[in-house]
């Protein structure tokens, strides 16, 4: 991974499917639930402690990694619960289901649902925020986007499990964290529609929201760098040619991204820029951002994002992640079709300096079996190794 992103040729092609933790988290939650269910026994409630909870989370993450038989060349590290939240939490059994309850709020999370693949609003945000329509003041923005210092973040306990994962896998596998770009995060503050219209009607407010998120994201970036991971996967939505104009990209998206990518690299981390949507007209500006690698979706909505054409658009030096179609090819395709697409992408995207990583365009679909993902990893290793040997 490091060689591919540093312009150093290697004997093989790394494999790094995007968002591995999204696919694995339901297995992690199932393992987490199983451990607490055993502790509950016939009781209706079990009180959580930070030390025990972190041990259970750590064990559950390691168990989820076994789903694919062998790991790809990277895994993600994530924040977990703060010590304050854990100190006020209990596991409760009710009507055959199990809930994680934070008594200080109070909020409850249905662990049984998470084990089936549902998203956790406490950790990943609420979809309702995308529909925000009320008029916002700058004080509202400050309240919705707190800028928490690097040291406060590290002291919160939310990185304690990540520290253990990093210690377990450091120097064996590329460790990355996912951070949304400031523009991407803005939609959760002002809402989806208001973000797009606000770039015309409330430019100062949108600038303020983006800048506030830049400050908050930079502190997260500093915290992850202090823990010794290898890179950041900067994810971005709604900024492609199919959503906003080049002028809006330059005004509302580019400056904050340029700052964060430069800061990421100054901290010794690799910066991977992942965009959804039609990125073809954005390629010159992406080169100006100078990330260490570029990742992007598979072809969507009648536009084609062909790996060979993207390679031609960015030249030979920028490392590209493959964008294999996760549904038509990975989940639904035959083994021969998957193998052919892996090989086609390696041939179209890899350069003499090895600046290519086998990947997928979107998160692995939930109905894709773990065995299929394992087969995909092995095919990439086999085909990438043979290409590396000539």
Image: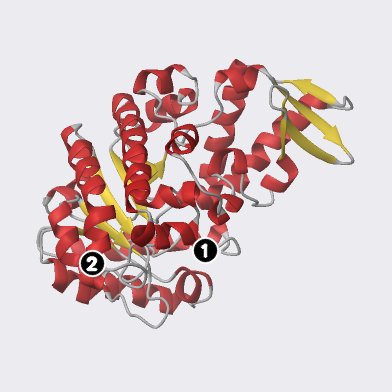
Q: Nearer the viewer, residue 62 or 244?
A: 244
User: How far, Cα to Cα, is label 2 from label 1?
Assistant: 39 Å
Residue 61, placed above or below residue 290: above
Q: Which residue is mark 2?
A: 246
> So how many labels did they put on this image?
2
The residue beneath circle 1 is 372
| Residue 114: image location, x then y, percent | 67, 46
Q: Position of residue 98 (x, y in %)?
A: 78, 37
Quarter-wise, where is residue 199 in the image? bottom left
What mark, if any, has residue 129 been given in the picture?
A: none
Side (left or right) of 30 relative to 295: right
State left or right for residue 174 relative to residue 59: left
Q: Colour scheme of this structure image?
A: secondary structure
Q: Is residue 229 above or below residue 303?
A: above
Measuring from the top left, give residue 72's x and y in whole percent: 39, 50
Tag in front: 2 or 1: 2
Which quadrant is home to the C terminus? Answer: bottom left
| Neighbourhood count class around disc 1 (C-alpha, 10 Å): few under 14, some 14–19, many 20 upward | some
In the foreground, 140 or 261: 140
First-in-chain label (2 vs 1): 2
- For residue 181, say whether it is visible: no
Give residue 28's quadrant in the image.
top right
Q: Secondary structure at mark 1?
A: helix
Under circle 2, the secondary element is helix
């Amino acid at each position: 991974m490091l060689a591919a992103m540093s312009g150093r040729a290697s004997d093989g092609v790394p494999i790094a499917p995007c968002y591995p933790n999204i696919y694995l988290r339901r297995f992690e939650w199932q393992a987490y639930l199983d451990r607490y269910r055993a502790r509950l026994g016939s009781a209706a409630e079990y009180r959580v402690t930070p030390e025990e909870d972190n041990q259970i989370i750590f064990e559950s993450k390691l168990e989820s990694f076994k789903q694919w038989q062998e790991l790809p060349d990277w895994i993600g590290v994530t924040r977990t619960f703060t010590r304050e939240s854990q100190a006020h939490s209990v596991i409760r059994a009710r009507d055959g289901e199990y809930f994680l309850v934070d008594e200080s709020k109070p909020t409850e999370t249905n662990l049984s649902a998470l084990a089936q693949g549902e998203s956790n609003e406490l950790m990943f945000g609420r979809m309702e925020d995308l529909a925000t329509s009320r008029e916002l003041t700058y004080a509202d923005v400050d309240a919705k986007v707190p800028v928490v210092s690097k040291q406060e973040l590290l002291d919160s306990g939310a990185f304690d499990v990540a520290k253990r994962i990093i210690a377990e896998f450091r120097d064996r596998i590329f460790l990355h964290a996912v951070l949304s770009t400031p523009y991407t995060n803005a939609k959760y503050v002002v809402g989806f529609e208001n973000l797009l219209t606000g770039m015309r009607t409330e430019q100062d407010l949108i600038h303020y929201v983006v800048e506030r998120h830049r400050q908050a994201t930079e502190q997260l970036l500093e915290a992850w760098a202090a823990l010794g991971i290898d890179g950041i996967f900067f994810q971005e939505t709604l900024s492609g040619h199919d959503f906003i104009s080049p002028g809006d990209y330059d005004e509302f998206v580019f400056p904050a991204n340029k700052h964060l990518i430069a800061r990421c690299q100054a901290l010794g981390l690799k910066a991977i820029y992942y965009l959804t949507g039609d990125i073809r007209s954005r390629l010159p500006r992406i080169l100006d951002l100078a990330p260490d690698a570029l990742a992007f979706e598979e072809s969507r909505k009648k536009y084609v994002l062909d790996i060979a054409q993207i390679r031609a658009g960015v030249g030979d030096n920028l490392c590209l992640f493959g964008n294999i179609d996760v549904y038509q090819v990975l989940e639904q395709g035959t083994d021969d079709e998957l193998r052919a697409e892996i090989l086609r992408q390696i041939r179209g995207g890899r350069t003499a300096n090895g600046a290519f990583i086998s990947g997928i365009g979107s998160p692995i679909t939930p109905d894709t079996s773990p065995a299929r993902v394992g087969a995909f990893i092995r095919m990439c290793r086999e085909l990438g190794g043979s290409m590396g040997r000539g």
